Image: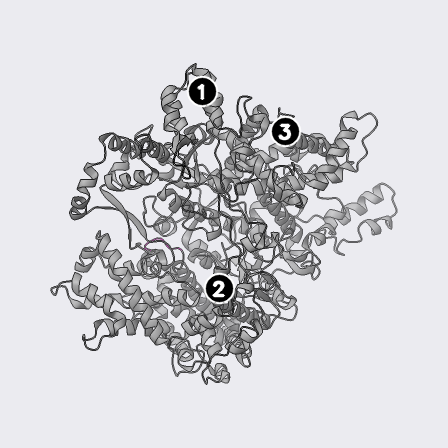
Amino acid sequence: MPLSDEQSELIGSYFSRNYEQGERVEIPPDMPDDPYGWFLEQPVIQLDRFPLLEVRYSPDKTPPRILLREEEDFLSKSIEDAKANSSPITLLQDIYGPMQLDGRILSPSHHEFKIWLQYKVEKVARGEGSPRFLASREEGGNHERGIALDKWDDLTDIVYELLNDKLLMQDGILEVRQLKLIDKITDRRELEESWGYEESYELEEGYGNSTRKICQVVVQSLISKSIIRPPPAGEEYDVLRKNDSLEISLPGITFLDDASKRIASRINGLIQEAQRLHKIEPPKDSEYFRLSEKEEEAFQTIISNGFGSRQGSERLKNSPPEKVTLHNSMKLSYNILSLMIERGFLERRLMDWEDLRAHFSNQEDSKAPRNKKHSPPHLLVFSDDLKKNQIGCSGFSDYKKNKLHPIYRWLSIERDRWMYCHPKRHSHLQSGWEGGLLSDSEIISNHSDYEDFETPRCRPSEESVFALSSLESTQWEINLDFVEALFDAEIDDNNTHLEGGIRGKIDSIFKLRPKAIFKPTFFLPDDDLSQEDVARKNEERKTTLDWVKRIIEHNANVFWHSWAFDFRGRVYPRCRTLSPQGDDLDRALIRFKEWKPLGERGIFWLHVHVHNLFQGRPNSNWEPPQKRQSFEDRDLWVKDNLEELRRIANNPEGNIDVLGLNKFSGGKSEAFQRLALVIELDRVWNEYDSKGSWDKVHSGQPVHLDATCSGYQHVAALLRNQTLARLVNIVPTGGIEDLYSEVSNLAKKSTLADSDQAVQAASQLRVFLQENFSDDIPSKWKERLFSRDLAKQMTINKIYGSSKFEKCFEGRRGEGPPMWVRHPKSEERLEQERAELDAIPDEIKDYFSKYESLEPPYYRGYWKWSWFVNAVKRRGGTKAEAESYRDLIREWSWEAAWHPESPLYKAIMKGAEDLVTNLFEGNVILQKEMVSPIVETYLRALNEVTEGVYEMFNESLQDLVVPDATFYESAIRWNLPDGFEVRNYYIKHMDGAKSKQGSPTHVSSTYSKLRPSWYKPNSKFSILERIEEVLGKKLEKLRDELKKPNKKTGKNSPQWDSTRVEMELREIDPKNVNRDLDEVRRVLAWRDYSLTRFSDDESDRINGPKAKRSITPHLVHSLDAYHIRSVIRRMSEPEGLLDFWAVHDSFGTHPSRVDEMVDAVRECFYEMYSEMDINAWMKRMAPDQFEPVETGDLDPQEFLASEYMIN
């Protein structure tokens, strides 16, 4: 039943009735210690005005946005009822004791709703509840989220039906019997006093059945971990666009890893629920609910041993139940995957180089395939049946129109996010730290592998955790002024605009849509080759807007972030979106909920911040603001150009070039922030014009200042190096120094100086320029090669331990991969390869043309590369020869070009009319050859400018890491002054071949009841025997091809090759007419998936070389992290309240508190190093290996006089 008109009006006007501009939301004093516990004690719950049990909850009959946000005079009504029933008034005192004296049943700001909503969001993220907790199907039918959830249910039903047909009827499978037993016990919910069977919202959505819950998370893993890849640009791919081809895929190892964890989480939750319900004694007449003696024994086995069996893996013999459950959940995932492939929902192929780059290039190292010598991972590709018939809106035309099915976006966002309520205050329990999220919150991010082996790499302290709690007290809001400038708010799916602005609205916002002129700034074009995964980025932008809408609608524009440490103590929000550590849009969209008076110093710092964001921006109406100006000069520039800045604020559409909004803005861009800040500048000046005093003007705009290459600041302090200290502004210099500019200036001087003055450092680059550029090209262009922007990323990477610097110049934003392009081979190279190419048999060339074909059935066939390799092997060749043939036959090769967003590309390329640009454009080889000389030149310049301190610093620390110091018990560790302990410890994965035994994701893990009776797991040739039995003849030629020379004896012996047999079967029965071969086809489709695993033996697990390489950057990171934690603690009020902008080496707060913050930064830095230099730290870290190093004569007292430590 949809909401009534009255309820809809209450929901639509909730924001305008409850948003208090500039006011902090009042937090009940005892609420942060345990928000959900506080919630349970509130009158609305104690008086049973809102149902907590999900079996009684209905978003239609008990709408939370009404019952938990709209106040009613319950006390007066109860008194009247008592009088009418002749009940004593005193009886009400016990019942209504918790109620406010004025009769209010809800807290100010309606924290009951905020906590309930957060609790539900967390449950959905863990896969433990229905995502339909606010709206019914009817109400949400036209909303994207409703459409996505409907499709999720539909796909869940399809997978559930598949398992019912193929798996659940197999009672011989232990896991199936256990799931049915758990269902039988959890059905006892019907016997609970509070159970309303017919009204159960959970049952209505079908979330009571354990197998359906598993199917639900299988679909979630499949959709959320997939990426969308349109056909590449180029005329040769027009046939794919014409056929509406759109590849949606994910690596098999990614699916199995994610699905198994989600399934294990659900099964663990079901076991806990079954334990609770098992205590309910069924009535004598309820025979169904009673367990037999055998069932009772089986249930106790599940509790004590975990889900599934411990047999088949030595690793599980002494494992805890949770680990057994995870192992067998992975086995279950593997079998479900095999069934989905058999059903035709998914196709499988080996990943090629393009696939690996698309799926793993941006992932952390631990998730990437481990051993390149072995076969690449299998890729799971959504079939046409799944895309067209089951999901819909999944073709290239949908992608082009930005009309992909919303399920792809919505299932990818059910993860940790910002919080609707105040985070739970952190506390230390026997099991470890908890807090942040309302439940299941880990204080250390990305650390589970180490926790599993009880070898944590850090130990937080109470003092360090106080910094997290302080950050979590920051109340954020959406910058409504920025939103109204950039977006149109619509109130229905007919694009009806919201009238009168957001602040006074009475209708619910249906969608926020970028204004037409800003759409290119907001969304990437679908054919943008410079970006990885355009579809994902655009969907993320849509998600951000949806979250903005939710914060406004559900929470009257307030939200919080939960924070965590990494193992070095750096602080991170669990959700980067809408946080200080997000991209340009995220930073522009947020500001502090509380607005503080600016005062004279506040407006000064706001002006400084405006100047910082407009540095270098061209405008015919001003002299562009420059870097390295004093704070006073920055303030003066804003005052001098105030009229122009305010004009821009009032007409952003007419000033997109000045603002930088003429192209997509993401990552480290500042275009959106520029607009947000200039709008705020205009707003506060308007208010000042009317009030006449800055003390009466309030603002919630954060002002943040960045450290000058903070890593080198810490190294300079540790080594007491005066020269480096001046370059990074930790001592007074009379101005602002710039390490990056010093490096680029030296690189330029050493390269472009007269030959007798040039240093050896630049010889490679000088020679390259002389050999490749004639005298008729103006030499001035060479100056483009030298800038602080080119020096910056390499300088930063150096101090944090990187040894690969090419990406700093040719990679995307100086951090990512280069732009890989298909580059035509030169005539010279083609001629060199001519003889080898002619020697390749025509038959092989024909096979290869089919391998490269874009026409069905060859294009991206699941057997594609293996098919070509086997074609070569059938002619007596090898896999290596197949790779050689590929490289020879192709008239192009993959080459690394400068990424369009790389520092080099931006520095050199100046437009189509530029002579130098034309020389480099398309000349991939010239681009590639230029990178190495530039890297060498800048590295040597950096070494000279910094007096080689990093090498000495790094070598001294690495000498501490002796072989014994790589084991956990003896690993080097150090305590920061606040007690946070860092442990320099690393583990590595096993080789895929070594980890195969007992693996739950190999063919041997197929449930025995799903194997045909003729199949022998230990003899793959039983498959060939079955084919021959069905055909009634021997396949002697195939058997001969399956014989390979034995490496030890040299004699030919049978070696199984599933792909080769698959190919033969395809030739024998291309249209799958022979149904007697169906079982063979099914078994042949089974494949091994090698997930990353660790050895149980620590000596095989430790990664000594990594520990040695990493000790230097880890120490620097940990010192950097301690510095910002110290500033956070110093800026916090006694009760921990704080508004703070934290980004590792960027410090931000209210404009009126910036002076206080700058002082805190200096003082905390001085206190860190007043008595501790590098020798003191090394002696503390490894007293037995420590050898003193020579330090400089820098006096730490000078740190207190630094003006521009952050600027």
N-terminal of the two: label 3 or label 2?
Answer: 3
Q: In this image, 1186 relative to 949: left or right? A: right
Q: Which residue is mark 1?
A: 1027
Looking at the rendered structure, the secondary structure element under dot 1 is helix
Residue 175 in the image, given as x and y percentages of width and height? 64, 32
Please state which amino acid type lies under the numbered disc 3.
Ile
Please state which amino acid type lies under the numbered disc 2.
Lys
- Give residue 658's quadrant in the image: bottom left
Image quarter (top left, top right, bottom left or bottom right) of the C terminus: bottom left
Given residues 1126 and 311, the one toward you in this image is 311
Q: Which residue is mark 3?
A: 173
Q: In this image, 393 relative to 1096: left or right? A: left
- Give residue 558's quadrant in the image: bottom right
Say few, some or many: other residues with alpha carbon within 10 Å of mark 3 (under 14 / 14 to 19 / 20 or more).
some
State the residue at coordinates (63%, 68%).
463
Residue 1108's disc number: 2
Cα separation, mark 1 vs mark 3, equals 27 Å
Whether 911 is among the magenta residues is no
Residue 323 in the image, given as x and y percentages of width and height? 63, 44
CB contact under 8 Å: marks 3 and 2: no
Looking at the rendered structure, the secondary structure element under dot 3 is loop
Say few, some or many: other residues with alpha carbon within 10 Å of mark 1 (under 14 / 14 to 19 / 20 or more).
many
Segment tinted magenta in the rendering: 662-666
Looking at the rendered structure, the secondary structure element under dot 2 is helix
